[in-house]
Image (cartoon, grey):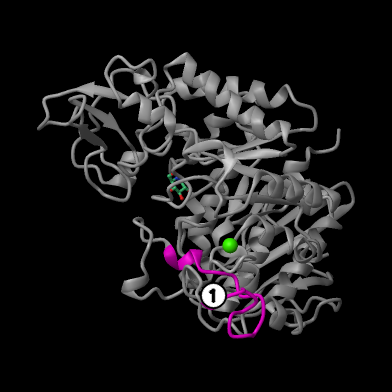
Amino acid sequence: MPAPWWQTAVVYQIYPRSFLDTNGDGVGDLEGIRSKLDYLTWLGVDAIWLSPFYTSPMADFGYDVADYCNVDPLFGTLDDFDQLVADAHGRGIRVIVDWVPNHTSDQHPWFVESRSSRDNPKRDWYVWRDGPADTPPNNWIANFTGESAWTWDAATSAWYLHLFLPEQPDLNWNNPEVIAAMHDTLRFWLDRGVDGFRMDVVHAIGKGTDLADMPPDLNRLEQTLFHDYPRTHDLLRDIRRVLDSYTGDRMAVGEVYILSTARVAEYYGAGDELNLAFNFPPLHAPWDAAAWGRRIERVVQELDPRGAWPTWVLSNHDVVRHRTRYGSEARARAAAVLLLTLRGTPFLYAGEELGLEDAVIPADRVVDPGGRDGCRAPIPWNSDDSHGWPTTETWLPFPPDPAHRSVAALTDEPSSILHLYRRLLAARHDSPALQSGNFALLNGPDSVIAFERSAGDDRRVIVVNFAAAQVAVPLGELTVEVSSDGAGEGAAYSGVVPASGAVILR
Ligand code: NOJ
Ligand code: CA
């Protein structure tokens, strides 16, 4: 049996606002994405994941959905979406869309109805609790605000729950009508040909009915560990059945923001829940061999035995870019070798192939309530004043050094990080060992992570040196296939890996 596409694919995340604007309003749009499909083909990605482009008042930049079945005019139209899918599929690129099941916008007609009166038929579609008005029903804390996860609705004298902003009320997945309506939103996009969904905070949908207090004094990150409900697993099995009722291997990758690999593993079920779950602990790993080694071992221990396929990610629209976190391009390059050779599905975040750093956002241009603007800055396409955007008035400023960090400039530079990503993707495509082979850690010096990937006679050895000095890692007679600094490719391996460097050997 060949591996399903979502195991061998390299997925490229696009934050639509920031990819490319085509109508001059300074905000990226679907047509901008479509116009750059040739670039994505040249780079070699297999699938794109689009962050939300649905109708939204944008309190959380689209993660507050007011209509699950339409495109916000800011991004274009449903026709634009259909054209994008058709053109992507024409190039063999799969399309994954975001799905936000935990909460809607407070402007969603469902919530407008729900809050209109206590006896509205949609009242129970959200999580309401009675007063007193001065004491929230429990001690849960909302993301972004750090304040209570409950907002008092004076008109109907009741509290509603929101794990995120007050503008993002949580849906009540204990109500069968909500389940049916949300399944319909999946079918809407499945019917339009999408290949899968990235499911936003999906672990939190199955809240118990008692909504008990958390242990006292937990911070927001610690509280995430408690949003892990048995009922979510039943809901995920139903969701999986909706996906599996379609032909063509539709998939679900879940944002399971629980920083415990063992508990995230549960969300794969017995192969009947999520196809993939994001593996976030590495996002919080410093550039350190031991820290990365522990996280890799945990994945091997917790996921492999249950046949759960891992995922790897270094950057996304919620965290500081890894180029910035790790502090140098050499490290970002070595990290890319690791990301694209570990066993599992890698997720790239648009712009990491350019070695982009987070943008510096002046105080008067901060727009995100969660403080994540820096990693969401526009992609520079060329060295012009507006970097390929139709206006210099972009919704956020460009990242540092945009002229040099642009797609056009780095394409012209064979030694650039962009060409490294392209060679890494090509090396993966050519190698069953890298795509789906076995994984075995090798012994090496403390500053090194070394491992072997193998499938039949196809074999690769990968060495990543986290130290700021070169290190000897003798491994016998091998040839350098890809090196993070581009040196020595095609030549015999010298047995030495440069400072903050990485190699794929064969
Ligand atoms: C996780 C998303 O990645 C983030 O951007 C969003 O703000 C929250 N979920 C709430 O939907
Ligand atoms: Ca636009």
- Bounds of the magenta span? 373-392
The extreme right residue here reads: 457
Horizontal and vertical percent position of residue 395: 48, 67
Chief SS of the magenta region: loop
Horizontal side, residue 453 vs residue 140: left or right: right
> In front here: 130 or 146?
130
Give the residue displayed 64% in from the left and 73% down from the top.
354
Is-magenta flag for residue 383? yes
> In front here: 318 or 103?
103
Quadrant into which the N terminus falls: top right
Q: How crowded is mark 1: few (under 14 residues within 10 Å), some or many (20 or more)?
A: some
> In front here: 486 or 189?
189
Rendering quarter of residue 82: top right
> In front here: 418 or 434?
418
Give the residue displayed 65% in from the left and 31% down from the top.
188
Is residue 443 among what the camera can see? no
Residue 478 against residue 345 in the figure, above or below: below
Horizontal and vertical percent position of residue 3: 80, 38
Is residue 344 among what the camera can see? yes
Residue 70 against residue 9 in the figure, above or below: above
Give the residue displayed 50% in from the left and 40% down from the top.
200
Give the residue displayed 49% in from the left and 56% down from the top.
283
Horizontal and vertical percent position of residue 118: 27, 18
Asked if disc 1 is less than 8 Å from ligand 1, the answer is no
Residue 185 against residue 25 in the figure, above or below: above
Residue, disc 1:
467
Per the image, label 1 sits on a secondary structure element best described as loop
Q: Which amino acid does label 1 sit on?
A: Ala
Is-magenta flag for residue 429? no
Horizontal and vertical percent position of residue 435: 78, 50
Horizontal side, residue 425 vs residue 443: left or right: right
Quadrant into which the C terminus falls: bottom right
